[in-house]
């Protein structure tokens, strides 16, 4: 009988299932190569943990793998219902909390500790702030983020494309006569699928140096809200993969949004709210030749520890999804 152990977190309401045991070694010379291998070697485990009855259509998680070199504490392969993603900011925040709380890194009990993580899109950092020996906040330091194109027609609207570890298409919800609210979610999912389909193979969605990072991963719908304490304020929902909805403000999506806003002249922090009301605080850490490096502050909370089983006689096997 197969048994897979996990430690589960949520970041801003978005689940993150960290696999801690029961998975064979995933070969590869680096984390990006291991992602390619994982699509074959451990895809059944991904389905087991994502699909019903153990998961759901919007489940998210990762396999822990060795880092590319001793400069990082760990490596991570991010996964969801439809496959393996190249970046995950909310997951990076959860991994920072996990690494400190599980003692994988030596942490300052009353200060900040950097947890360096290799992910398919590159090397990122989870800066974990502790007080009294408890994790109080985690800041995700993203890979360089930049604008790819603006005003690309798709799904009956115009989308702005940016890279934040994955490629995102940004569209004001008002352009569709909608707002980022739960009552409009099904309509937004439908529009996201049409926008993503129209952008499939579009030259503007190509990563400039690695084709494995190309293609629209998520569509971000956003609303402008009144400024808050001197910071710009937007509410967003990211619909990623095939109609999956990020409950958090989306970490790598926030990096992509900040790249677009900075290129348009924003020089203040960004309060990024999600469709469920959770928040990230994003700021530009530094400007690069073609974009920015974003710092995105949030918090992750442990929700449980699990030992999932697959009975060889179970006719449902690794499960199913209804959408």
Image (cartoon, grey):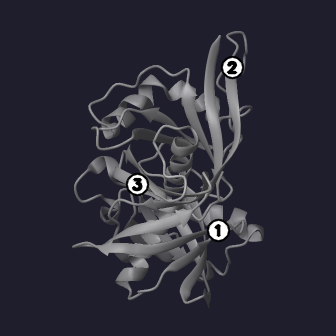
**Residue at the spot 40% in from the left edge and 68% down from the top edge:** 294
| CA gap, disc 2 and disc 1 | 33 Å
**Residue at the spot 28% in from the left edge and 50% down from the top edge:** 211
Tell me the crowding category of disc 3: few under 14, some 14 to 19, or many 20 or more residues within 10 angstroms, Cα based.
many
Q: Position of residue 45 (x, y in %)?
A: 56, 26
Looking at the image, residue 14 sits to the left or right of residue 291; the answer is: right
Q: Position of residue 18 (x, y in %)?
A: 57, 37
Q: Secondary structure at mark 1?
A: loop
The disc label shown at residue 274, or none: 1
Looking at the image, residue 184 sits to the left or right of residue 116; the answer is: right
**Residue at the spot 40% in from the left edge and 77% down from the top edge:** 260
Q: Secondary structure at mark 2?
A: strand
Q: Secondary structure at mark 3?
A: strand
Viewer-nearest residue: 70 or 222: 70
**Residue 202, quarter of the rendered image:** bottom left
Q: Nearer the viewer, mark 3 or mark 2?
A: 3
The reply to whether the C-beta atoms of the residues labelled 1 and 3 are less than 8 Å apart is: no
The reply to whether the C-beta atoms of the residues labelled 2 and 1 are less than 8 Å apart is: no
Q: What residue is shown with label 2?
A: 309
Tell me the crowding category of disc 1: few under 14, some 14 to 19, or many 20 or more residues within 10 angstroms, Cα based.
many
Q: Position of residue 302 (x, y in %)?
A: 67, 45
Q: Position of residue 3 (x, y in %)?
A: 63, 18
**Residue at the spot 30% in from the left edge and 63% down from the top edge:** 203
Tag 1 or tag 2, which sits nearer the N-term? 1
Question: Which quadrant does the C terminus fall into?
Answer: top right
Tag 2 or tag 3, which sits nearer the N-term? 3
Q: What residue is shown with label 3?
A: 125
| CA gap, disc 3 and disc 2 | 33 Å
Q: Nearer the viewer, mark 1 or mark 3?
A: 3
Looking at the image, residue 164 sits to the left or right of residue 49; the answer is: left
**Residue 199, quarter of the rendered image:** bottom left
Tag 3 or tag 1, which sits nearer the N-term? 3
């Amino acid at each position: 009988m197969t048994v897979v152990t996990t430690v589960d977190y949520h970041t801003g309401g978005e689940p993150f299932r960290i696999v801690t045991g029961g998975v064979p070694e995933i070969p590869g010379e680096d984390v990006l190569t291991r992602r390619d291998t994982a699509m074959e070697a451990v895809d059944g485990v991904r389905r087991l943990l994502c699909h019903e009855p153990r998961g759901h259509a919007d489940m998210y998680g990762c396999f822990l793998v060795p880092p590319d070199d001793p400069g990082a504490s760990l490596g991570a392969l991010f996964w969801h219902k439809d496959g393996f993603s190249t970046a995950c900011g909310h997951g990076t925040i959860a991994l920072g909390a996990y690494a400190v709380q599980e003692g994988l890194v030596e942490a300052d009990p009353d200060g900040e500790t950097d947890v360096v993580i290799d992910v398919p899109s590159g090397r990122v950092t989870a800066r974990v702030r502790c007080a009294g020996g408890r994790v109080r906040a985690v800041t995700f330091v993203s890979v360089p983020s930049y604008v790819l194109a603006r005003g690309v027609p798709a799904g009956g609207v115009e989308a702005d494309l940016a890279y934040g570890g994955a490629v995102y298409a940004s569209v004001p919800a008002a352009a569709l006569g909608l707002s980022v609210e739960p009552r409009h979610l099904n309509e937004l999912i439908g529009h996201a699928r049409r926008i993503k389909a129209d952008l499939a193979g579009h030259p503007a969605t190509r990563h400039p140096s690695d084709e494995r990072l190309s293609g629209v991963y998520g569509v971000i719908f956003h609303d402008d809200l009144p400024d808050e304490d001197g910071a710009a304020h937007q509410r967003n929902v990211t619909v990623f993969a095939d109609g999956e909805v990020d409950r958090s403000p989306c970490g790598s999506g926030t990096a992509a949004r900040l790249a677009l806003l900075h290129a348009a002249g924003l020089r203040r922090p960004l309060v990024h709210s999600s469709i469920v009301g959770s928040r990230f605080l994003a700021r530009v850490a530094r400007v690069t030749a073609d974009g920015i490096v974003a710092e995105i502050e949030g918090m992750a909370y442990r929700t449980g520890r699990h030992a999932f089983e697959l009975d060889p006689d179970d006719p449902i096997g690794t499960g199913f999804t209804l959408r």
